[in-house]
Amino acid sequence: MDILAGLIQTAFLAGGVLALAALGEVLAERVGVVNLGVEGLIALGAMSAVATVVITPHPWLGFLVAMGVGLIAGMIFAVATVIIRANQVLCGLALTYMGMGLAATLGKPISGSPAPATFQDIHIPILSDLPFFGRAFFSHSLLVYLIFLVLPVALHVLIFHTRHGLNMRAVGENPAAADAAGISVMKMRFWYVSLGSALAAGAGGYLTLVFVPSWSEGVVAGRGWIAVALVIFAGFRPINAVLAGLLFGFVTALGFVGQAHNWPIAASILSMLPYLGTMALMIVPVLAWQRMRRLMAAPDSLTVPYFRDQR
Amino acid sequence: MHEDSIQQRLGLAPGTPPLVALKGVSKYFPGVIANEDVDLAVYPGEIHALLGENGAGKSTLMNVLTGIYHMDAGEIIMDGESRRFASPIDAIAAGIGMVHQHFKLVKAFTVAENIHLGWDATPARISRKALEERTMRLADTLGLAVKPGAIVADLSTGEQQRVEILRVLARDAKVLILDEPTAVLTPSEARDLFAALRAFVARGNAVIFISHKLDEVMEISNRVSILRAGRKVATEWTTDCSETSLAHLMVGREIVLNDMRGDGGARKIGAPMVTLEGVTLKSEYGTVLKNVSLSVRAGEILGIAGVAGNGQRELTYVLSGLVAPSKGTVTLDGEDIGRAGARVFAQKGVGHIPEDRLYAGMAPTLSITDNAVLREYALPPLSNGPWYAPRRALALAREIARIAGVMVPDFAMPARNLSGGNQQRLVARREMRIADKVLIAAYPSRGLDVGAINTMMRYFVEMRDSGVAVVLISEELEEVLNLADRIAVMFHGEIMGVVPAQGADIEQIGLMMGGQRQQGQAA
Amino acid sequence: MSYRLQRMPVAAPSVLFSARVLSVILALLTAAAVLALSGKDPIALGGKVLSSTFGSRFGLEDLGLLFSPLLYCGLAVAVGLRIGAWNIGAEGQFNLGAFAATGVALFVPGPAWLLVPLMALAGMAGGALWILIPTLAKAYADVSELITTLLMNFVALLLVYWVATGPWLDPSGMALATTARLSVSVPYVWGIVHWGLPLALMLAVGLAVMFAYTRWGYEVRIGGANPGAAAYAGMPVQRHLILVMLMSGAIAGLGGMMEVAGTVGRLQGGISNNYGYLGIMVAVLARAAPLGVIATAFFMAVILNGGIVLQSQGLTTHTVLAITGLILFYAAIVDEVARYKLIPTTGEVTPKGAR
């Protein structure tokens, strides 16, 4: 039982990166832009967070700086894909490589050393002391609650229960219709892509300030790509996205437990689980249930740049 | 046209200003004058038709009026003031609403969600129930029946159009612009629409009705402005015009509304060339073709009429071999080839001019050469065993372009850069080359100007006269009536009836289009 | 005469080449600016790169060793693009090719003239196998191959790492994280440059011929540009998709075999060294044309070599990755901007009716 509680606790820790990055990507894809630069954004955020904390030991500042870096990178990406309307796939790949390369180059001095200040778990009276549930659910840092509770609910309400959210979804489904209805497609796309990038970089900050916690060039390990895949699996819905992140955190936690308990499977093989699991999640539901395709359908205009004056 | 007399004839107080006036509006696109120096004035209580052939600039002009395009010259005047519409929201705020030919609806949303899109009267926090209740109230007030909770993708085009109109009217539109609204309606639905429009203008509003159909313009409008090649040619009172005079103004020359069926008796119609027997087709959307039995004979043109989306596209798939029927047989010249596949069909002499050539019949980003040889690339002299000769392909492409009368500066250029009319001519001649037995033409005149349409029609007559069985699918009833020998009407994937085109009863055809089955079918 | 900007549906072919050159120049200028800002002299560094690379025989041989895997990976991705598929998994397929070839070398006895071709076949099979699941998922479930091929990369990297530090670890105890030295190797053609390079060049030419001068090449071209039109013409689109994607994986796998059996001599973690990802850049810059890939792979090899040469200056291979990302970014932007033409607002325009 204790193992299970520990697993769940680690699931939150490990899954936080995926969950926050996936939330950011949900925002971008809901307005019809696919941002494949998440991996690079996480790297940039991860590196910036540690760099900040090395200078002044305030983890929240590190997290905010990470988000700020992501916002700027996201705006550059948005200028290219939303305003100039260049190919989204290429720009996303470019952002990944630029982000990873830049983070590795600038982060060399701080590579490998543990972050001087990290997010501490907070103690909630009564709840944290509960047997099993206390350890599993109520012994986390504030950031975890933000990512798994506050943000997804807030975003869900925004996207599905407000006038603004209705307009936003229209931009992703049929920008011509949104335009004719008087909604500014470009503004919506620009801001949500930038905001989504900020969240993705924030996920990087979470990675190096909560989970690992240090920066090195291989630390992102494909989590950005898993997050992009999770968004598809989650049907582009915020609450599903963090649940999917949690699920993957659980798979990762299993791998850790396996290593710690010397299971007969090599560490490398166990580390494959998240990637194989993601692939299975992408393929199996679509194969098994034809209806899934319509339910999990992507916003109709995903990846398509919008030109009002197009003939 | 003298200002006072306009108000007088419309029954307005003298000096009533127009609801909206366009002065000297011009708009240009690459290599094309879409509009030049157009003047238009629309008064309260009038239904003003905007008439012109495809490509005359009607939709462009209205897109300028509704803020989707920016005009290169001219002004828009409302309430005596010159207005600038930087984006659609400005036009909507000014009381101008447009129902486009291709609806601007979000298919995945419900009717209620679409109505409330981009509308500042929508409350900041919304719930499905609340939106649906508000929609019901709006629908009742404005007298348009809609289903608030339905997903738009599941509605018929007529219902979708009503949603569009409701959306526009809910924003307090005073000027309602409709772009070719009856293209997607049965004759009786069109009549309902006209009644609603008359009620609308009776309340002091105005309608701009874009159309290229002369009979409709005669029926519904008070005044009509004719556009030709981007310029306004005339504005007339409809009662002062006839279909012939309008056609003359539209095209700029005397045209004889041709009966191309020719000398009925002298032409020989042969044995059935392609026969569908009990064809049923199921897809992930359900049963799209139900028990279809049809026969097309050599040397005849069979017209398929019906509102688009009633199974015509699926019919072309089966006729061209792209899809095998779930039940039933397809026989070509005595041979059962239903399951043989598109390549075999083409080899055996079935040509297909597809409905959406950019999606199906062409690869727009590839060169003109690549597109021209799509049917013959595997045959000698272009191919020899596994090898393909690009130079011979170019020679064939030149030949096809020459016969099609298309001037191509560079055959390596992407086919997308050609005009729609030229693309269609190229595709048509390419298909005609291999269509020894059957030619299927799906909506061949869509988006083409009168010159290109006439060319198409001549091609079909040419094929017919050389003994090919031609299947012509069209939403222009007039086209089918002028060209076909027999007319089959489709509705919800079934053939409602087949009638001879000569002396056909339009009312009866209209009823069949709306779902009424013909008594005692004539195959 | 006043002018207006108009967006054309497809950019003119004459502009496409100069667009590519422009994006490279812009990226290099940006990199130079960044270098200058951080206190280094970009011109001197650039000169050092060129002289080290082209000035000595060793430099050219090193260049050749970088050129070869970039060619294989670039061709692999380019082939995938021809049928409209994004093979981001060249990195993983490269690893699998190396893995399979190593397996043959370590465990199959035989003379070199037999083993080396066998290893090549194993390499191709390994690469094709690694792209099989993403291929089938795309063909039958319409799952985006972009992400599935990418995820397989991580699995492949872990696999190679595990095998090189575990079951296949060098038994002589001399190495910590690689296999034993392979008993056979690909013969050398010039200095330490092995036959893998000329083979890759021939492969590029062969592919160019196949795409332009065979019926199959025509069908792949149509299928990649518009599957709807290909189906309409009765082409076996599904079959072509699967075959071409497997080819793509096989080519990357062959590159891996050449790397392990020609350049490195042992299987170790990191043998793929980002070649797969750089191959994407190479293919995109060349607009998926096999002959163009020769040029862009060469160019990329020069940049990579520059990264190695400049390591003493504090630049890493990651800096190189960042620069190639920048090139890709500019390429995407310039491609879009290149569609705009300057049109005079008065002058030769034809009225719409007269066509």
Image (cartoon, grey):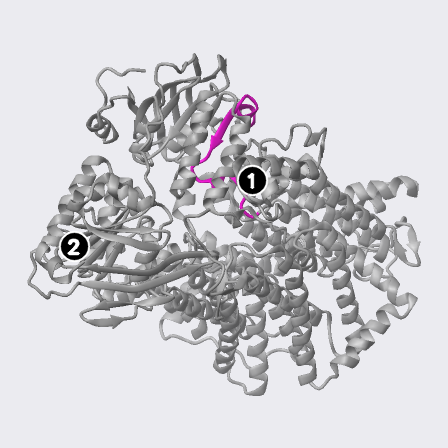
Q: With B51 as the anchor, is A22 left or right in this view?
A: right
Numbered mark located on residue C88 in the image: none
Q: Is residue B350 magenta?
A: yes
Q: Report the residue at 46% width, 65% height from top.
A: C345
Q: Chain of mark 2?
A: B
Callout 1 touching callout 2 (CB < 8 Å): no
Q: As drawn, is B497 to the left or to the right of C44?
A: left
Quadrant placement of the C terminus of chain A: bottom left
Residue furthest out toward the front: B254
Camera-nearest residue between B155 and A126? B155
Q: Which residues are magenta?
A: B343-365
Mark 2 neighbour class, 10 Å CA radius: few under 14, some 14 to 19, many 20 or more? some
- Is B347 situated above or below B216? above
Would residue C218 be found to the left or right of residue C313 on screen?
left
Q: Which residue is mark 1?
A: C139
Is there any visible trace of residue B278 in the rendered image? yes
Q: Secondary structure at mark 1?
A: helix
Question: Label 2 sits on what residue type?
Answer: Glu
Q: Chain of mark 1?
A: C
Q: Secondary structure at mark 2?
A: helix
Residue at which label 2 appears = B133
Q: Is the residue C121 above or below the residue B58 in the image?
A: above
The percent coordinates of residue C121 (x first, y second) are: 79, 41
Residue B481 located within the stretch drawn in magenta: no
Question: Which residue: 35% across, 50% down?
Answer: B56
Q: Residue at x 65, y 54 (%)?
A: C287
Q: Amino acid at mark 1?
A: Ala
Q: Is residue B212 visible?
A: no
Q: Tell me if A252 is positioned left or right of A236 in this view.
A: right
In the rendered image, residue A46, in percent from the top left (x then y), is placed at 57, 73
Q: Is residue B452 above or below residue C45?
A: above
